[in-house]
Image (cartoon, grey):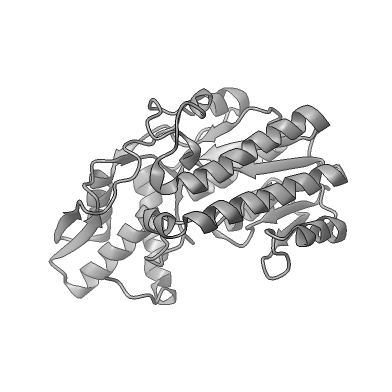
């Protein structure tokens, strides 16, 4: 069913990293009727709160971005919480969307759902060919269960629910608190603060041999608008650039852009995570005619500039 510009779009996580850019991209496309689901108003892990959300707000469309998420360290420390919170939120939101006859539900999944040793680049058809990388498996499996729920509800109830798999994202407004940040904001912050202190080296996790694909946040937000307005299929859809870089090369690139001239030391006692992570993005190009437009170097420079202008808001101690 087509989404009208008059439809009320409820965005969970709408004040977060991706959500803030999604709201802007929706407005650029003429979708001005938005409702931001705030955690202080609705605890989405509680079914009664989700029921009240649908009853009081009466959205036509829900884009479910809210998640309990973090880097490798946060995933190792919070496997139970990450599993429960992510599964509970999606479970209640999808079930009550069915009950009220929601026009469209967009579930944002995660690249962490892919098997640890899936052939690279990851194709949507390989999603079930193995167990996810162990450090983020609880998070990835919880999100993957919601794909099954979306497909099952479409098949049994005719519910218009779609599911997307964005790759690792980065950009301005990301989380730069080191205890929970992902690799790019962590490296940006380490390099900026080491440069300013005159440090002779920084310490990076793992060996640097793992590779990752990174998607600039505004590109992801743009893709989500295309998905919401035009995608109608039970099959999951990858969102990414299709290009990967080793963590070693990424770290060296960030250090160069920041102007940190010291050494980069590696701590092999820390996990590398999944050996390689890169998506096949041919399907989104074929189905929606969409592709990412921001190069990694341009996106990183925008991220670095934003952090340097907002660094005073991140007060946790660098170790």
Q: Is residue 60 above or below residue 66?
A: above
Q: Quadrant of the N terminus?
A: top right
Residue lying at 47% horizontally and 35% vertically, measured from the top left: 114
Measured as percent of width and height from the top left, residue 5 is found at: 79, 45
Residue lying at 86% horizontally and 61% vertically, measured from the top left: 56
Residue lying at 40% horizontally and 34% vertically, measured from the top left: 278
Q: Is residue 290 left or right of residue 95?
A: left
Q: Is residue 166 left or right of residue 107?
A: left
Measured as percent of width and height from the top left, residue 217 is found at: 50, 49
Q: Quadrant of residue 3?
A: top right
Residue 226 shows in this picture: no
Measured as percent of width and height from the top left, residue 311 is found at: 39, 72
Residue lying at 37% horizontally and 52% vertically, measured from the top left: 300
Q: Is residue 25 left or right of residue 35?
A: left
Residue 291 shows in this picture: yes
Q: Nearer the viewer, residue 57 or 8?
A: 57
Q: Quadrant of the C terminus?
A: bottom left
Q: Nearer the viewer, residue 229 or 166?
A: 166
Q: Is residue 214 above or below residue 39?
A: above
Q: Is residue 69 above or below residue 144?
A: below
């Amino acid at each position: 069913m087509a989404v009208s510009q008059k439809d009320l779009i409820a965005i969970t996580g709408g004040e977060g990293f991706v959500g803030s850019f999604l709201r802007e991209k929706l407005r650029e496309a003429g979708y001005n009727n938005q409702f931001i689901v705030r955690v202080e108003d609705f605890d989405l892990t509680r079914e009664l709160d989700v029921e009240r959300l649908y009853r009081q707000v009466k959205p036509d469309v829900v884009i479910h971005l809210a998640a309990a998420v973090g880097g490798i360290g946060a995933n190792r420390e919070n496997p139970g919480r990450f599993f429960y919170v992510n599964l509970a939120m999606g479970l209640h939101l999808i079930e009550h969307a069915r009950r009220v006859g929601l026009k469209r539900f967009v579930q944002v999944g995660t690249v962490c759902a892919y098997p640890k040793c899936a052939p690279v680049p990851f194709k949507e058809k390989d999603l079930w060919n193995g167990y996810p990388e162990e450090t983020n498996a609880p998070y990835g499996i919880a999100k993957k269960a919601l794909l099954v729920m979306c497909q099952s509800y479409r098949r049994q109830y005719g519910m218009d629910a779609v599911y997307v798999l964005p790759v690792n994202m980065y950009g301005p407004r990301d989380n730069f608190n080191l205890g929970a940040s992902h690799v790019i904001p962590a490296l940006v912050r380490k390099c900026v603060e080491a440069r300013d202190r005159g440090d002779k080296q920084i310490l990076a996790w793992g060996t640097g041999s793992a590779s990752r694909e990174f998607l600039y946040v505004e590109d992801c937000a743009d893709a989500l608008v295309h998905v919401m307005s035009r995608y109608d299929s039970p099959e999951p859809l990858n969102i990414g650039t299709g290009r990967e870089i080793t963590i070693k090369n990424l770290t060296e690139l960030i250090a160069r852009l920041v102007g940190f001239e010291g050494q980069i030391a590696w701590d092999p006692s820390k996990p590398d995570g999944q050996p390689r992570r890169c998506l096949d993005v041919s399907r989104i190009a074929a189905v929606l005619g969409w592709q990412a437009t921001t190069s990694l170097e341009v996106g990183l420079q925008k991220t670095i500039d934003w952090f340097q202008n907002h660094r005073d808001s991140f007060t946790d101690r660098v170790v």
